[in-house]
Image (cartoon, grey):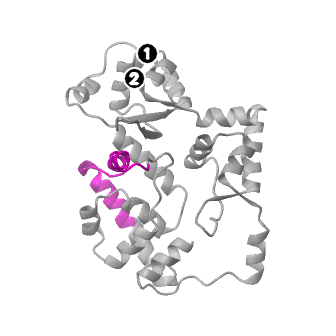
């Protein structure tokens, strides 16, 4: 919320929503909130497992702290734990299985009982969608896959684990296509959009994957671009800090030319709703 208000003031916007009344503030203060590390410990998850649970929408974040760090309502943690226990009577293990990921083709192939080259082909042709990435010390992308999704794929498509590739896959392979970055971006954007109904925040998610020149063409108003930049989502968990590795990861966060029409159409739709909201309420974005 503070980030949004700061962006709106910088853009010269009007009518930031007034503070809640005293009673509402008291109620908010009464909500028990804990930080991410404590929330992960209470759910029996590692830091990376908890981050993936949040990413996948299994755990919903509460109001952020004054410094911007995420906080989680104890009631939400109790809901997640109760749901897991009802599912199998072993909450931490069950929850951990939902977020368990394997890194790279070797680990994924071992899980599916196939060779790494077949796994790589299935992934490059878009049949296996990554849930995340790492940049190794050689600045190469190591894709992460949800173990549960790989197992579901094996049950659903056993024929694809053996025999010759389909004509479509052979054509993609011959063209040296790699759909992993595009598939991951679509998943990443979809998960971010699923966390908010605010039209300005949704527009910021879609704007964040467009390269600068494409964004300037799609959003010619500099005041709107300031708002969108202020609301842009942070990089996903595990995004590298070292400049050289971060530059490699940044390419994964940026759409390619074939994707521009889809993201621009979504951005235009979100901005239409955002502008209409600003005109009616005056509490978001330029008017």
Residue 261 place in picture, x, y as percent:
28, 56
Chief secondary structure of the magenta span? Answer: helix
**Residue that badge 1 annotates:** 114
Q: Which residue is mark 2?
A: 119
Q: Is residue 245 magenta?
A: yes
The residue located at (36%, 56%) in the rendering is 209
**Where does residue 75 sit, x and y in percent of width and height?**
76, 55
Is residue 239 found left or right of 31 in the rendered image?
left
Residue 241 x/y as whole percent: 43, 50
Question: In the picture shown, does residue 279 fall above or below 269?
Answer: below
Label 2, residues with CA under 10 Å away: few <14, some 14-19, many ≥20: many
Callout 2: SS = helix
Image quadrant in which the N terminus is located: bottom right
Q: Residue furthest top?
A: 163
Relative vertical location of residue 140 with respect to residue 210 in this rendering, above or below: above
Residue 239 vs residue 200, the one in the foreground: 239
- Where does the magenta region start and end? 241-269
User: Tag 1: Cα neighbours inside 10 Å, few (<14), some, or many (≥20)?
Assistant: some
Whole-angstrom CA distance, mark 2 to mark 1, is 7 Å
Reply yes or no: does residue 155 show up in magenta. Answer: no
Q: Is residue 190 above or below residue 6?
A: above
Quarter of image, res 106? top left
The answer to whether mark 2 and mark 1 are in CB contact below 8 A is: yes
Residue nearest the viewer, comparing 238 with 280 = 238
Which is nearer the N-term, disc 2 or disc 1? Answer: 1
């Amino acid at each position: 919320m503070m980030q949004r208000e700061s962006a709106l003031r910088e853009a010269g916007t009007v009518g930031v929503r007034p503070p809640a009344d005293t009673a509402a503030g008291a109620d908010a203060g009464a909500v028990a909130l804990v930080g991410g590390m404590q929330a992960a410990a209470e759910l029996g998850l590692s830091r990376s497992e908890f981050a993936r649970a949040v990413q996948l929408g299994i755990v919903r974040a509460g109001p952020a702290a004054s410094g911007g760090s995420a906080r989680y309502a104890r009631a939400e943690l109790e809901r997640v734990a109760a749901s897991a226990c009802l599912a199998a009577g072993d909450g931490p293990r069950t929850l951990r299985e939902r977020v368990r990921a394997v890194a790279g083709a070797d680990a994924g192939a071992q899980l599916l009982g196939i060779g790494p080259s077949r796994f790589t082909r299935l992934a490059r042709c878009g049949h296996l969608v990554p849930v995340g990435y790492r940049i190794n010390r050689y600045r190469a992308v190591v894709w992460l896959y949800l173990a549960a999704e790989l197992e579901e794929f094996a049950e659903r498509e056993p024929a694809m684990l053996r025999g010759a590739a389909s004509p479509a896959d052979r054509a993609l392979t011959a063209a040296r296509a790699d759909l992993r970055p595009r598939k991951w971006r679509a998943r990443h954007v979809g998960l971010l959009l699923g966390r908010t109904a605010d039209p300005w925040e949704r527009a910021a998610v879609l704007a964040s994957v467009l390269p600068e020149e494409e964004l300037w063409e799609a959003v010619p108003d500099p005041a709107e671009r300031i708002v969108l930049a202020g609301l842009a989502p942070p990089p996903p968990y595990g995004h590298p800090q070292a400049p050289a590795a971060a530059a490699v990861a940044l390419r994964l966060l940026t759409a390619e030319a074939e994707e521009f029409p889809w993201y621009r159409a979504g951005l235009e739709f979100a901005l239409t709703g955002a502008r209409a909201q600003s005109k009616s309420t005056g509490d978001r974005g330029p008017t």
